[in-house]
């Protein structure tokens, strides 16, 4: 057997073992939220991560089934403590119990590669009215000290994912170099960043250019993206052509103001929703992600922080049980649909392959092909509004909103959409398509144009799934055997 052939087989083996989909942007991770009525089994989701070469994942809890599915994959994991548990972590004993139960129990050969613990999620958000103001730092301190005491503090760091509203620039000088932490939380923020620095932990920030558009109708539209604007912001000779760079560098300046300008920064969440608002659609999401991934692949960084930036996309899968208090788009942040299928072309290598789609969830089982709709012969419509309201209270009708994918439906279409969403949420239960005699079942797909009438995922046991990437390694093993046999 020629040495050239051996080298070819060897390189093919390395390719299979390292990255099935090619080279991923090395700084890239994803947020995996689970606030859905019908969750994909964790092992199916983990296989999606592996199939797409995603090697970092940020969670919002430390659920045992999720952690078990991640075991043995070597995917870097950020586990999390929800905000409602922060006050409990004021007790060092409780913090040590949490670390034992959710971190060190997975710290073994073939366990979970935990890299960070997220202490809370945006706890200083102004909408929370200081609810977690005095519980966040004690929780952070106790969790990191518990990690240190357990002997894993050198490799696992506690951090606090914060919303970008913890800092800003003054109205009379709205440039990144004038960035400062909010005056009402400056004491707490200084405590946190000094403790992070002492423990060599990163500052984690969530940046959402989409929300800049959503919150201000006068916000310059193109400034939310990365492909240039006609009137960039000038700051001491630096041009800012997009809000992501300006926001990130405002944080850098805020850290400099407390003498910690070199602190490592992680972007814990960044993304673009695909429904639920006039600016939330697939085309804008594609535009945003395409340029973002290209920048990450080139390690472009920002004017004040050129180079590598660790970034977690938000999010992985749509979540139809998320609160819509911030906006109806909240349930549509996923780069995958509710069923784990990709929404649009996306090249995670940043190499701009136009028609490349992510690998979707495999072997997804759906409920039968049945839809619930408004009866065509319905006569008494006096109770229709009440029943639509009921259906949308328990089902997800966010796609019906202004500028959303189903906004063009007529009144009958709106009713059918609402009835069907409730019917699917209820697993197509026998009594869930009645609505006081106004609804009827059909086996004809009643989707219209860009408006999809969902068939929900069939309920499954999250434990029923083969080991992640087993077929993947089988292919590699076959190649290895071939190498020795030839």
Image (spheres, grey):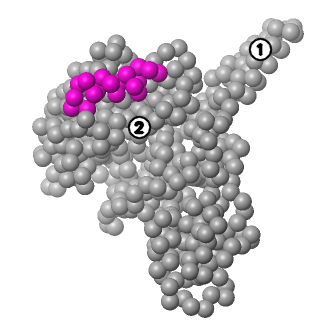
Residue 163 percent across, percent down from the top left:
30, 46
**Residue 223: which quarter of the image?**
bottom left
Determine the secondary structure under disc 1: helix
Front in this rendered view, residue 318 or 5: 318
Residue 94 falls inside the magenta stretch: yes
Residue 265 percent across, percent down from the top left:
33, 32
Q: Which residue is found at the position 38% from the left and 52% from the top?
A: 209
**Residue 187: which quarter of the image?**
top left
Label located before the other in sequence (1 or 2)? 2
Q: Quadrant of the C terminus?
A: top right
Q: Main secondary structure of the magenta part?
A: helix
Q: Which residue is found at the position 34% from the left and 67% from the top?
A: 217
Residue 189 in view, yes or no? yes
Q: Quadrant of the N terminus?
A: top right
Relative vertical location of residue 415 with respect to residue 117 in this rendering, above or below: below
Crowding near pointer 2: few (<14 within 10 Å), some, many (20+)?
many
Q: Which residue is mark 1?
A: 480
Residue 320 percent across, percent down from the top left:
50, 56
Residue 255 falls inside the magenta stretch: no
Relative vertical location of residue 329 with respect to residue 2 in this rendering, above or below: below
Front in this rendered view, residue 324 or 164: 324
Q: Which residue is mark 2?
A: 61
Front in this rendered view, residue 354 or 196: 196
How far separated are the C-alphas under marks 1 and 2?
Answer: 39 Å
Q: Which residue is found at the position 64% from the left and 63% from the top?
A: 428
Front in this rendered view, residue 365 or 189: 365
Residue 164 percent across, percent down from the top left:
29, 46
Q: What residue span does the magenta drawing correspond to? A: 89-106
Determine the secondary structure under disc 2: loop
């Amino acid at each position: 057997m020629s040495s050239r052939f051996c080298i070819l087989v060897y390189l093919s083996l390395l390719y299979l073992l390292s990255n099935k989909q090619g080279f991923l942007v090395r700084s890239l991770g994803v947020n995996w939220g689970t606030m859905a009525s019908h969750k994909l089994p964790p092992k199916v989701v983990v296989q999606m991560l592996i199939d797409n070469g995603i090697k970092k994942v940020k969670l919002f809890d430390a659920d045992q089934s999720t952690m078990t599915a991640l075991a043995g994959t070597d995917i870097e994991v950020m586990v999390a403590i929800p905000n409602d548990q922060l006050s409990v972590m004021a007790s060092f004993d409780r913090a040590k119990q949490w670390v034992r139960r959710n971190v060190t129990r997975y710290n073994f050969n073939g366990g979970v590669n935990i890299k960070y613990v997220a202490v809370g999620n945006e706890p200083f958000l102004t909408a929370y009215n200081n609810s977690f103001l005095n519980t966040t730092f004690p929780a952070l301190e106790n969790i990191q000290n518990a990690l240190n005491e357990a002997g894993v503090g050198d490799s696992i760091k506690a951090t606090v994912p914060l919303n970008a509203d913890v800092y800003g620039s003054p109205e009379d000088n709205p440039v990144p170099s004038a960035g400062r932490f909010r005056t009402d939380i400056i004491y707490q923020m200084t405590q946190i960043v000094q403790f992070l620095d002492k423990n060599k932990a990163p500052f984690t920030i969530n940046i959402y250019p989409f929300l800049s558009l959503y919150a201000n109708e006068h916000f310059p539209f193109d400034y939310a993206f990365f492909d240039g604007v006609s009137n960039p912001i000038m700051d001491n000779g630096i041009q800012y052509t997009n809000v992501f760079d300006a926001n990130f560098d405002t944080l850098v300046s805020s850290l400099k103001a407390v003498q910690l300008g070199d602190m490592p920064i992680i972007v814990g969440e960044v993304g673009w929703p695909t429904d639920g608002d006039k600016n939330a659609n697939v085309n804008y999401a594609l535009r945003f992600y395409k340029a973002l991934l290209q920048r990450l692949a080139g390690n472009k960084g920002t004017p004040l922080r050129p180079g590598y930036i660790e970034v977690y996309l938000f999010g992985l899968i749509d979540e139809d049980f998320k609160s819509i208090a911030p906006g109806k788009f909240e349930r549509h942040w996923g780069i995958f649909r509710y069923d784990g299928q990709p929404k649009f072309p996306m090249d995670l290598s940043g190499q701009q392959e136009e028609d490349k789609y992510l690998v979707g969830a495999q072997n997804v089982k759906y409920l039968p092909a049945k839809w619930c709709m408004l009866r065509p012969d319905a006569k008494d419509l006096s109770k229709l509004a009440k029943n639509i309201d009921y259906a949308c209270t328990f089902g997800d009708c966010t796609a019906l909103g202004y500028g959303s994918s189903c906004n063009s439906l007529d009144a009958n279409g709106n009713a059918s959409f609402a009835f069907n969403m409730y019917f699917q949420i209820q697993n197509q239960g026998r009594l869930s398509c009645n609505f006081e005699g106004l609804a009827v079942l059909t086996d004809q797909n009643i989707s219209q144009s860009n408006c999809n009438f969902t068939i929900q995922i069939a309920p499954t046991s999250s434990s029923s799934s083969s080991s992640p990437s087993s077929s993947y390694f089988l292919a590699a093993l076959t190649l290895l055997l071939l190498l020795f046999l030839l």
